[in-house]
Amino acid sequence: MLNEKYIKVLYIDLETEKIRIEQREDLMPYLGGVGIASVLLKENIKPELEPLNPMQPVIFAIGSGAYIFPVLTKTVAMFISPLTGELGESYAGGRMAMSLLMAGYDALVLTGKAKNHSYLSISTHNVNIRDARAMWGMPVSTVGQNVRDREHHDGRAIGKRTIICIGQAGENCVAFAGVCVDTYRHFGRMGLGACLGSKNIKAISIYGNRSIPVLNDKQYFKVYKDIYKRCTETDSMAKYHDVGTPINVLPLNNSGALPTFNLRATSFEHADQISGEAFAHNNLVRKMSCTGCPVGCIHIGMYRREFDKGHEYEAISVAYDFELIYALGTFLGIRTTDEILAIIEEVEEYGLDAMSTGVCLGWATEALEHGHITIDDTIVKLEFGESREYIKAIKYLSTGVNEFYRALGKGSRYAASKYGGENFAMQIAGNEMAGYHTGYGALVGAAVGARHSHLCNGGYSVDQSMKDFNEDAYIEKLFAEECERCMTNSLVMCLFARKIYDRQTILDALNSIGWDLTNDDLGIIGKRIYKTKLEIKKALGFEQEKVKLPKRFFETPSMQGKLDEETAYRMIKKYSEKTEALLRE
């Protein structure tokens, strides 16, 4: 994309092993990232087929400023979500955006199913489908090393490299299986791991060693330095480097917005023991950055694990953040940092999305209490606060050991529809809730968001920033932010930097590398992308008015107090009217 007037797309048909490259000038109006990924998904989906049918596409795309400017570090994946049955969208940092850029591709489209268990090796001049039968069943931690040993020994395939892989959860098509990216980053939500597993793909290695000149280097470096200084010399991103996102644990707990015990409560009496400060004091050993980011927001914690009798211990390092502490901590009543890290490690090894895993286990714990399921189903006695039993359950969930765990592997919505307990299965349109019970913004925002994520439109932030509740003002803010994030996610920008990359900064950055954009153009691009997403959802049969929210969202007080069910559904209807109007434009 840099210095070119087209988007370069690599298509791989795993079934026929045919490969082609297209230079798509028609994709330029979508900017990059989620914009071009949305178009490619729309072009290639088969609405009449199931989400995990191998003919369904998986799309990866990088942004228009990927790796060229600070914190534009992410890659977007788009697919049909096996968890929700509709639009799947996930983001990951690490080295993938850089590697795709250096290999010479703006987007990758995968279709079909490999004949055997395989991994992909992609470079500037070659694409190979390699045998991965020996890796099938391996935990995530060993797959990357195996691929590295095969691809990069003796100096072969030297270059800017990324390796992404799935665990046993992806192999077994658990609907919320994730994809590990360069050890510490993930395509976490919506089930991308299951999509790759359904295609017999265990891993993808991408490397490239291109040298790409910047044509207007004087203007480019001026903009680059300004952004870099704001990232490193102001307070805009300081909290992400310091304690990181776990800094949110205590403020949310104190404001009554931290989901606890399967949302029976919104504060946790042991919050101070598992706060960001506690993790930093007890476990933090290292901070890392995605390639191209100067901030260092990836926090690595260490705990000791006993692997054999006789005081045989090993030190385990694992990345942690707020969402993991919420889902695998407060939501399950876990009281110590070491226990949370141990649960995270198990989730990582099997390749699951942490948030869906925690929320599904929260539902299962309460369903067992209420007699909807029995210990014959769960095999272990699930109890809030008992980390060892949850660790065992994660293995059973990932491997689908019995009918119950196979049902749970399709998400809390499906499991509750089969066993009961829908009122406390804390999902929104099939996607398990995030760690914010802040009010109408968080709840409605996730319900109407394109992928039903708290990151679609930042509804939790709307709750925290607006002093007085006004449903019409909320709807306007949610809609405007959804369109805006469609545009910024075409860069693809880490959302931690959204205050740094205001409209003017985006224009300065892109125009310094050859674009010719105005502020109005950015607004048009955001709406154009959002409309494409809505068209995909409609083609897949999504009907907003059929979304049913679990009763507990209205029973457990939020930061704004108890939410009114009628008000929430009225807001969803008002928002839907805006999306219908956009579709008609």
Image (tube, grey):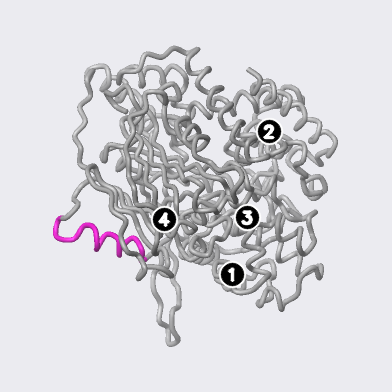
Q: Are marks 2 and 3 in contact (CB under 8 Å)?
A: no
The residues bearing labels 1 and 2 have C-alpha atoms spaced at a distance of 38 Å
The residues bearing labels 4 and 3 have C-alpha atoms spaced at a distance of 20 Å
Residue 235 position within the rendered picture, expressed as x and y whole percent measured from the top left? 44, 31
Residue 300: give its label. 4
Residue at the extreme bottom: 310
Q: Which of the two residues, 492 or 157, is positioned nearer the viewer here? A: 157
Residue ID for mark 3: 271
In the picture shown, does residue 473 fall above or below 15? above
Q: Which of the two residues, 472 or 178, is positioned nearer the viewer here? A: 178
Q: Quadrant of the C terminus?
A: top right
Residue 410: give its label. none
In the picture provided, is 170 more to the left or to the right than 141? Answer: right
Residue 573 position within the rendered picture, expressed as x and y whole percent measured from the top left? 77, 30
Q: State which region is magenta.
A: 142-155
Residue at image coords 26%, 17%: 219
Residue 455 position within the rendered picture, expressed as x and y whole percent measured from the top left? 57, 38
Residue at the extreme left: 154
Q: Nearer the viewer, mark 2 or mark 3?
A: 2
Q: Are marks 1 and 3 in contact (CB under 8 Å)?
A: no
| Residue type at tag 1 | Gly
The residues bearing labels 4 and 2 have C-alpha atoms spaced at a distance of 30 Å
Label 1 or label 2, whichever comes before in sequence order: 1
| Residue type at tag 3 | Ala
**Disc 3, SS:** helix
Q: Bin the neighbour count of mark 4 within 10 Å (Cα to Cα): few under 14, some 14-19, many 20 and up.
A: many
In the picture provided, is 441 more to the left or to the right than 181? Answer: right
Residue 400: give its label. 1
Residue 463: give its label. 2
Residue 152 is a magenta residue: yes
The residues bearing labels 1 and 3 have C-alpha atoms spaced at a distance of 33 Å
| Residue type at tag 4 | Ile
